[in-house]
Image (cartoon, helix red, strand yellow):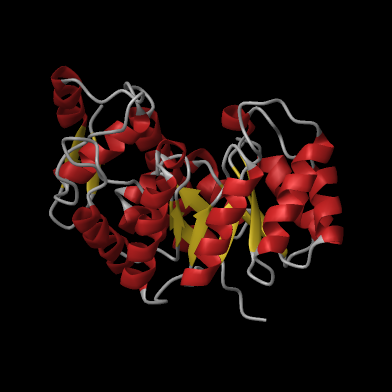
Amino acid sequence: MEKKFFGIYPAALVPFDEEERVDFNVWERYIDFLIAKGVNGLFLLGTNGEGPLLNMEEKKELLRVAVNVCEKRIPVIVQVGEITTDKAVELAQFSAQIGVDAVAALPHYYFKLNDASILEAFEEIARAVEPLPFFVYNIPGYTGNPVKDSILTKLKEKTSNLIGIKNSEQDLAKLMGYKLKFGDDFVVMTGTDSLVAPSVLMGADGAVSAIADVFPEFCSKLYEEASKGNVENARKMQFKLLKIRELTKSFSDSRAVLKYIAQKRGIFKNSIVRKPLKGLSDEEMKIIDGKIEISEDGELKIKQ
């Protein structure tokens, strides 16, 4: 069977106007930009897409536009996790109806859940969209509810469409363990830019990448080098990726930094994030200007 879900999936940013309304015109151009720069798929409405800060109608319209622009050129995975199961099912079913390629769900957040509750919610969401492929999204640092391997094992037994996981923990051994436990056909995507090259070199299928939101060319090349086993090239590029990641994490909000870089590249009109996330100050923008240099073809230079 031909592998469908692999490579670099940008965790797509969502552009806003000055009143923090979604800018759908920029969104259209942004989706086209990412595809033109060679990404392998799109991961929508996740953490970097400010998904929890969007209302249901905004999410649905963003998905409608993205699917129409994409025209099946690359796969689209939609993060449908919400604070309630009913809302997650609603978004998952809508996503299936408009033709996305897979849905992913994180455990419900805020409330501390036991394993049985997490499993029950995943099962309900997955079954609501069968046979559409379903991914579990594990990001315990944000949800407070880790997805144990025992939950995945039971979910695979109870559903027909669980095909993989996006894991955002910085744990290479855990990524490798999924392949050992669930087989090579189980799709494993790292959700942290700190592990792109190591995880791919050790057999993971790809990465959902924040840095690919603004440097899709670089991240796609890194994946290519790692997937071909070009260890030295992949190593050098991974260290450069770590520098970029460190830069984005050193300011008020990493999404605002990424949006500012997108603005510098002429993709976004501004770097606005939705409250309560904190945007960049003028001083922070000046610091970023002094740290990165971007050529017209997207080549990136990080200054010390």
- Is 201 rendered above or below residue 138? below
* Furthest residue in direction bottom, as rendered: 1
Instruction: State left or right for residue 212 relative to residue 146.
Output: left
User: Splitting the image into 4 quarters, where does residue 141 fall?
Assistant: top right
Point 57% across, 42% down: residue: 82
- 43 or 286, which is in the foreground? 43
* Image location of residue 232, percent across then percent down: 48, 51
Q: Nearer the viewer, residue 294 or 25?
A: 25
Q: Position of residue 207 (x, y in %)?
A: 52, 52
In the picture provided, is 304 more to the left or to the right than 52? left
Report x, y in % for residue 150: 85, 44
Residue sitting at 69 percent across and 47 percent down? 175
From where the camera sits, is residue 105 visible? no
Q: Would residue 69 be found to the left or right of residue 101 on screen? A: left
In the picture, the quarter occupied by the C terminus is top left
Residue at (73, 46) in percent of width and height = 121
Image point 47% across, 37% down: which residue? 52
Along the line of sight, the residue nearer the viewer: 275 or 260: 275
Image coords of residue 276 (percent x, y): 36, 23
On the question of residue 89 being in view, the answer is yes
When asked about the image quadrant of residue 167, the answer is top right
User: How many numbered markers are drawn?
Assistant: 0
Residue 212 versus residue 33 in the image, above or below: above
Q: Quadrant of the N terminus?
A: bottom right
